[in-house]
């Protein structure tokens, strides 16, 4: 994990007939100015997402819970496997419930001799989103999280070469 920071984000569906024009927006949180951002153009029924900065009451931890590497072949190695599992824990330090979303991605192979397989230990996602220009999926775990509660999700995969 590159950054264990939780971020506050708001989203809404643009329901007006007239499009929202792109441009700079002022971001306020709890009545206080927290910064500026950019908003892309949004037509009717499109979802708009705005970031509101880091949330210091959300704690995220990602740990490796399994890492196995193996190879097979009599004289020359003909196949290799790399099995990994990661646990992501999210703690809500607020006194009120929140909705969390964890976006995660399986490795991607662009070579037919390398296969990536999601393993049964993986927490089922609530949605998957195709990534443009790549044969990958962003896996989304979205759920409510009670005040002062912790939730975990597991992503397990195996990479095999032949």
Image (cartoon, rainbow, N blue to C red):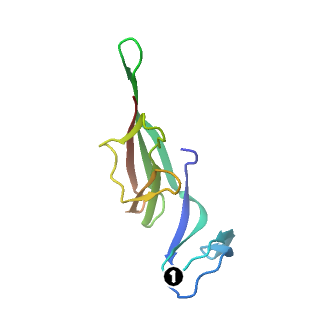
Q: Secondary structure at mark 1?
A: loop
Q: Would you place residue 95 above or below residue 17 in this image?
A: above
Residue at the spot x=40%, y=53% of the render? 150
Quarter of the figure with the C terminus = top left
Residue found farthest to the front:
112
Q: Residue furthest top?
A: 75
Picture quadrant of residue 98: bottom left
In percent of width and height, residue 97 lies at: 42, 66
User: In this orientation, does residue 81 appear?
Assistant: yes
* 160 w.r.t. 105: above or below: above
Give whichever of 118, 90 is nearer the camera.
118
The residue lying at 41 percent from left, 15 percent from top is 76
- Front in this rendered view, residue 21 or 151: 21
Residue 41: x %, y % from top left: 61, 75
- Rate crowding at label 1 as few (under 14), some (14 to 19) or many (20 or more) other CA atoms within 10 Å: few
Nearest to the observer: residue 133 or residue 103: 133
Q: Position of residue 160 (x, y in %)?
A: 39, 32
- In this rendered view, identify the residue nearer to me: 29 or 114: 114
**In the displayed structure image, the side of residue 16 where residue 145 appears, left or right:** left
Report the residue at 47% width, 42% height from top: 107
**Would residue 145 be seen by someone viewing this image from the given angle?**
no
x then y, percent, for residue 125: 36, 55
What residue is pinned by disc 1? 44
């Amino acid at each position: 994990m590159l950054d264990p920071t939780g971020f506050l984000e708001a989203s809404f569906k643009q329901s007006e007939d007239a499009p929202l024009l792109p441009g700079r927006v002022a971001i306020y949180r709890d009545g206080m100015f927290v910064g500026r951002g950019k908003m892309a153009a949004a037509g009717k029924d499109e979802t708009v997402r705005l970031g509101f900065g880091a949330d210091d009451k959300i704690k995220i931890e990602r740990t490796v819970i399994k890492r196995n590497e193996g190879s097979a072949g009599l004289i020359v190695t003909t196949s290799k496997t790399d099995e990994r599992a990661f646990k992501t824990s999210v703690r809500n330090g607020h006194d009120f419930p929140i909705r969390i979303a964890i976006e995660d991605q399986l490795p991607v192979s662009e070579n037919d001799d390398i296969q990536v397989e999601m393993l049964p230990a993986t927490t089922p996602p609530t949605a998957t989103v195709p990534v443009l220009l790549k044969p990958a999926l962003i896996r989304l775990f979205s759920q409510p999280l009670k005040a002062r509660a912790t939730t975990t999700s597991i992503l397990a995969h195996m990479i095999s070469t032949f």
